[in-house]
Amino acid sequence: MFDFKPIRKKSPWILHYNAGSCNGCDIEILACLSPKYDIERFGVINTGNPKQSDVFLVTGPVTFRSRERLIELYTQMPEPKVVMAVGSCTCTGGVFRDMYNVEDGLDRYIPVDVYVPGCASSPELIIDGLVKALEILESKTKEIEKPFKLFRNETNKDGVVNRRNSALKVGEEIDDEEN
Amino acid sequence: MIEIILIALAPIIGGLIYGLERVVRARMQNRKGPPILQPFYDMLKLIDKQAFIVNPYHSILGIMHFVTLWVVVAFVILGQNLLYVVFLHLLSALFLIIAGFSVKSIYSHIGANRELQAMIAYEPILIMTAVGFYMINGSFDISIIRESSPLLLSLPLVFLAFLMIIPIKLKKSPFDATEAHQEIVGGVEIEYSGIFFEFLYMSKWLEYVFIYLLLILFAGNSQILGAVLSVGVFLLVNLVDNSTARIKMKHLIKIVLGIGLTLSMINLIGLSYV
Ligand code: SF4
């Protein structure tokens, strides 16, 4: 059988999600796509569509309101996929750490493969991280990885699935009666 | 024999054109750009990806879009009736539109809607082109059109109108509102994934082959003119793509139908008096 794994790293398509970042890192990611750094030479396309992408680039500290979309996007991406946390605040919370509306980092919700530090992280670092992520992508299986905090069942009202508040806040207990 | 080989290789030729185009576009923007074989890497990767099926009809219609488009290209290469080719091409676009409406995604609906509107814009011009060929040769057969002397000289305005619809079919600025990658995330493509998206991706390549084959018809039996036309238009389309912004659907229809249809009408009426 033809081995597709080496091909994977030749065409990484990116999905970029802003989970409440200050926009600093988003601009650096856009700078990567600009003529000077040109990550399109690695075959990168910024698709903006979770169903066709391989690399999930997340910026921002994951605010309380953005976490459901984050998990929704993550589960909509087909395997194999890698997740990159771009920026200090995505890795640990950074300058936003311990704020009341912030979840302190991406890895409390979804499994992260590459952490790119820096506030804002430079395009060179992002490219380095991307190359590292592609190595990891090559070794991934097609087994489905679950996001960590999608515990509460979705409510089903009038035949319409409602995923509002499906992700828990850090430290919150599941209320059994509610489910 | 050579026709059969060409038909079998049509998607691969289209892929090479697409790869070359990405390199040319990157060079125009002073970038290095991806390798020429990049579309094939994408294709192989997509085979390996997990595929989500939203509903079976949606996926099957995507495949049918690809198959009918391949049949269209085969008909053009074999030199069949041009009018059949235009209408069969319409059918392949219709499959995609029905697929777009068969899922719940709003982006998909908007994309399908815009695809329909774009069809209103480009279909009359394709038919006008066919009629122009008919008025000169007395036949819709592509094999007869290929034998005639260069048609560009007697159909200059129809050729201009045809140039206007190339960006619509190839999803290029300024007429790429049907796909609008940052705005409606690819329109009808949005719910396709894995191997099913691959068929849409490859039908994009076939679209290239189809458009450039029609373009070469304007050169008639002169092969040099055909080569010059296809290279010139290839560069021109990419230059325009790089230097213009996307325009709204409403303006697209107004511009293409207003200018394109008028130009080809004038040409055809003039032709009937000569
Ligand atoms: S790491 Fe710094 S620059 Fe980047 S999004 Fe967070 S706060 Fe903004």
Image (cartoon, coloured by chain):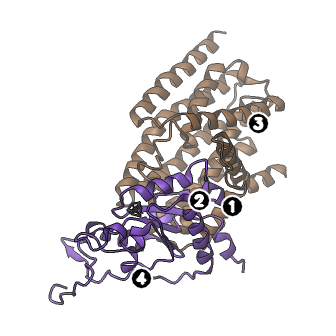
Chain colours: A purple, B brown
- Amino acid on which the number 1 mark rests in the picture: Phe
Spatial separation of the CA atoms under disc 2 and disc 1: 14 Å
Which marked residue is nearer to the observer: mark 3 or mark 4? 4
The label on residue B40 is 1
- Counting other residues with Cα less than 10 Å from the Cα at mark 2, is it few (<14), some (14-19), or many (20 or more)? many
The label on residue A91 is none
Spatial separation of the CA atoms under disc 3 and disc 1: 32 Å
Q: Establish if B263 lies above or below B242.
A: above
Q: Are marks 3 and 4 on the same chain?
A: no
| Residue matched to label 3 | B143
Residue B183 versus residue B233: which sits nearer the camera? Answer: B183
Which marked residue is nearer to the observer: mark 3 or mark 1? 1
| Residue matched to label 2 | A44
The residue marked by circle 3 belongs to what chain? B
The answer to whether residue B229 is seen in the rendering is yes
Ligand 1 appears in which quadrant? bottom left
Judge from the rendering whether residue B193 lies leftward or rightward of residue A177; answer left or right.
Answer: right
